[in-house]
Image: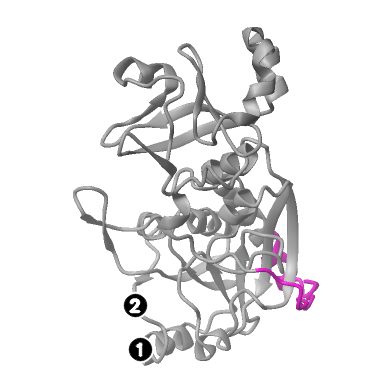
Amino acid sequence: MLKIVFMGTPDFAKDSLEAIYNAGHNIATVITVPDKPKGRGMQVLPCEVKKYALDKNITIYQPEKLKDNKEITNIIKKINPDIICVVAYGKLIPKQILEIPKYGTINVHPSLLPKYRGSAPIQWAILNGDEKTGVTTMYLNEQMDAGDIILQKESKIDKDETSGELWNRLSKMGAKLLVDTLEQIENKDAPRKKQGDNYTIAPMLKKEQSKIDWANKTAKEIKNLVRGLNPIMGAYSIFNEKKVKFWKVDNISIEEFIKKYKEFEDYEYRFHEIESGTILYIDKKEAIYIMTKEGILKVLEIQGENAKKMSVPDFLRGNQIKVIDKFE
């Protein structure tokens, strides 16, 4: 079994830490970020990796930074690990640390590299409407997500899957792939493939991306936005000068809508005259239907300003909303 220094922070990393611990590897120490205030009460709480390490009595270090940090560098040198495993740590690893372990420093990344290097690969895969993604293990170098690929595992993305759901699935997949990778490294038969220059970047998401652009986006694109931003921030629109978030939606064609609501058959020719963002129909038992640049957005779960997220039927019981009203 390998002697490992593990570096990671959120639940995605915790799954990998748990997997290699259960595989019998020697986790010499865990390095994670300092505790930070979280939630409405801004309580200082440990991250998921720290909580797991505490439960297993693994030594923990929480440096503010790694670059030019002689103390943490000397600690790792003294441990003399066979390998360093980095999973969603949140900081770039400097060269003086990367080069310490005998077998190098490896990483679990939730995309099929070289596609989606960067901090938000899961979200961008859904925002872009991709039908597949996966996880990659690789050797780290000084460039972001540019190291040699070791193993990859592909997975389909369900058409209704949110970034939160995909995060959880890839977290488990990545943990298993890390165990397989360590086994191959230990057996000295791990593959090593250089990345080409045909990479794409998945930058950190910005709050302004979460506003729905009714004028320029199709129903399918808006659905991908809602899925991609669930649960991290939610996609929103303005209604009666208040912010309304959309948490679950679907996209349907005009033909599909008319097939379901046959009373609209005689008015099909007028659908293209309706401005994007306008409420087309309200089904009090199921959904709100909103016209878009192309297709109709079927809203199933919604959240009013300063309110909880809820199903559309529950939302309609407490909010005045009518056909021809418009989301901005």
Residue 192 vertical position relative to residue 225 in the rendered view, above or below? below
Quadrant housing residue 114: bottom right
Instruction: Identify the mark at residue 267; answer none if there is no mark.
Output: none
Q: Position of residue 213 (x, y in %)?
A: 51, 47
- Comparing 192 with 205, the one in front is 205
Give the mark, 2 or 1, whose residue is nearer the N terminus: 2
- Disc 1: which residue: 71
Nearest to viewer (mark 2 / mark 1): 2
Helix, strand or loop under label 1: helix
Q: Residue at x 73, y 49 (%)?
A: 132
Q: Position of residue 180 (x, y in %)?
A: 70, 60
Distance from Cα at disc 2 to Cα at disc 1: 9 Å
Q: Residue at x 62, y 35 (%)?
A: 160
Q: Residue at x 55, y 57 (%)?
A: 16
- Comparing 123 with 164, the one in front is 123
- Disc 2: which residue: 63
Q: Which residues are magenta?
A: 180-200
Q: Residue at x 33, y 32 (%)?
A: 304
Kind of residue at badge 1: Glu
Cβ atoms under marks 2 and 1 closer than 8 Å: yes
Left-right relation of 305 to 171: left
- Comparing 59 with 303, the one in front is 303
